[in-house]
Image (tube, helix red, strand yellow):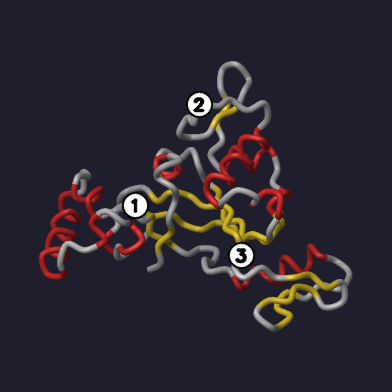
């Protein structure tokens, strides 16, 4: 099983666990380039073919996605978070793992945790390829942007700012998550829509 990480500092992990975030965009690395005659060039080969139609090329490029439709993926959390969680059986497994392998980086850094020791999972329901700036208003809400009572928008973890539109809020989110200038570069991204698997659901 694979794992996927969401930003804790921006409140995105919590937004996923509460069902408020059901979509995520991940910058494709390295970036492909588009040729009108051959489609998308990536890693030295034309992987997404689409004659004079970038949308066809995008669709044909989807098979390069790290996550596939129907795949169940673990939401990465630090072992410390799992140990403090409600799943006592899993917490015991994590404790035994740490006792056997040492209290290393995974205790506080979710980058180093095992997917099978994570308590929460999502199921990928849709995969697309697109340019970042093609995000729709509806997609911004799926990404976790929240509407306030005053008809402004904010990020899942309030950063002290209110935004006039979902797009400007999403732009701020991307800049914080992927680095300043990401929106302006308008990179190709994998777009994942997903659903949270409830406890006892599909594995």
Disc 3/disc 1 C-alpha distance (Å): 25 Å
Q: Nearer the viewer, mark 3 or mark 1?
A: 3
Query: For numbered disc 3, what is the local secondary structure?
Result: loop
Q: Residues within 10 Å of mark 3 (few under 14, many from 20)?
A: some
Rate crowding at label 2 as few (under 14), some (14 to 19) or many (20 or more) other CA atoms within 10 Å: few
Q: Which mark is residue 160?
A: 2
Q: Where is residue 51 in the image (x, y as percent from the top left)?
A: 86, 73
Look at discs 2 and 1 and give the one toward the viewer.
2
Sequence-wise first label, 3 or 1: 3
25 w.r.t. 63: above or below: above
Residue furthest out toward the top = 150
Q: Mark 1 points at which residue?
A: 120
| Residue at image mark 3 | 28
**Where the C terminus falls, by quadrant?**
bottom left
Q: Is residue 117 above or below residue 64?
A: above
Evaluate if marks 2 and 1 touch, with contact meaning CB atoms under 8 Å apart. Answer: no
């Amino acid at each position: 099983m694979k794992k996927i990480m969401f930003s804790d500092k921006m409140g995105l992990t919590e937004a996923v666990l509460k069902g408020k975030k059901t979509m995520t965009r991940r910058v494709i690395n390295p970036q492909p380039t588009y040729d009108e005659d051959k489609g998308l060039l990536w890693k030295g080969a034309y992987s997404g073919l689409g004659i004079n139609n970038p949308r066809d090329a995008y669709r044909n490029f989807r098979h390069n996605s790290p996550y596939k439709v129907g795949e169940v993926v673990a939401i990465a959390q630090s072992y410390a978070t799992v140990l403090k969680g409600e799943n006592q059986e899993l917490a015991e497994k994590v404790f035994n793992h740490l006792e056997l392998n040492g209290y290393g980086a995974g205790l506080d850094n979710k980058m180093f945790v095992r997917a099978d020791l994570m308590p929460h999972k999502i199921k990928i329901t849709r995969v697309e390829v697109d340019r970042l700036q093609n995000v729709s208003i509806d997609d911004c809400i799926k990404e976790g942007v929240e509407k306030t009572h005053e008809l402004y928008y904010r990020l899942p973890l309030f950063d002290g700012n209110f935004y006039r539109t979902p797009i400007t809020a999403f732009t701020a989110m991307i800049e914080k998550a992927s680095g300043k200038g990401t929106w302006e570069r308008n990179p190709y991204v994998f777009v994942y829509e997903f659903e949270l698997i409830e406890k006892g659901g599909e594995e």
